[in-house]
Amino acid sequence: MSRPHCCRKINHLPETDYFKPRAIPLAKLEEVVVALDELEAIRLADLEGLYHEAAAEKMGLSRQTFGRIIEAARRKIADCLVNGKALKIEGGNVAMPSQRMFKCDACGHEWPEPFGTGRPQKCPSCASDKIHRADADEDGTGRMRRQRARCCRRARD
Ligand SMILES: [Zn+2]
């Protein structure tokens, strides 16, 4: 079983990507790197409280793989807290939709919103507030697939 660990789906980017103990110069700190997929596992299981099975499905992983990822992530975070190390969040073979699609129930208009801009209030076409999220990886726009292709190419380099 040696499928490449490519492109775990994540739906969240952290607000900040670096944590360090106070009053210790960076040069003297040991740094632990937590990958974006590891952070996503922590977010889904520990913050949102999802069962591993549901969280694994969201990330497009088997439950076993998810279990390994979250175990590694928890150990790294524990290492930081217990041993006073800096924590850096970066990397990981992840695919993330670059935008979200929304659809208006009133007029059928569909439009993209970039990530991180919050939920739109109303349809830009007819101003109805009866709108819902139409996920980019489900509506056939190919967004997620393009992201994935780019990520895989980088991983092989
Ligand atoms: Zn509309």
Image (spheres, grey):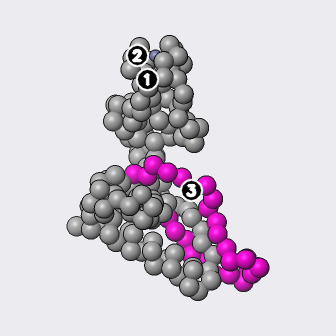
Given the image, on which type of amino acid does mark 1 rest? Lys
Foreground: disc 3 or disc 2:
2
Reply yes or no: does residue 12 show up in magenta: yes
Q: Position of residue 125 (x, y in %)?
A: 51, 14
Q: Are marks 1 and 2 in contact (CB under 8 Å)?
A: yes
Q: Magenta segment, principal secondary structure? A: loop
Disc 2 within 8 angstroms of ligand 1 (CB):
yes
* Separation of residues labelled 1 and 2 (CA atoms): 6 Å
N-terminal of the two: label 1 or label 2? 2
Q: Residue 120, located in which quarter of the rendered image?
A: top right
Above or below — where is 148 with respect to 39? above
Disc on res. 10 = none
Q: Position of residue 108 (x, y in %)?
A: 39, 17
* Separation of residues labelled 3 and 2 (CA atoms): 34 Å
Q: What residue is shown with label 1?
A: 130
Q: What residue is shown with label 2?
A: 106
Disc 1 within 8 angstroms of ligand 1 (CB):
yes
Reply yes or no: does residue 31 show up in magenta: yes
Q: Are marks 3 and 2 in contact (CB under 8 Å)?
A: no
* Separation of residues labelled 3 and 1 (CA atoms): 29 Å
Question: What's the magenta region?
Answer: 9-35
N-terminal of the two: label 3 or label 1? 3
Given the image, on which type of amino acid does mark 2 rest? Ala
User: With 28 as the anchor, is 100 left or right in this view?
Assistant: left
Q: Secondary structure at mark 3?
A: loop
Q: What residue is shown with label 3?
A: 14
Q: Secondary structure at mark 1?
A: loop
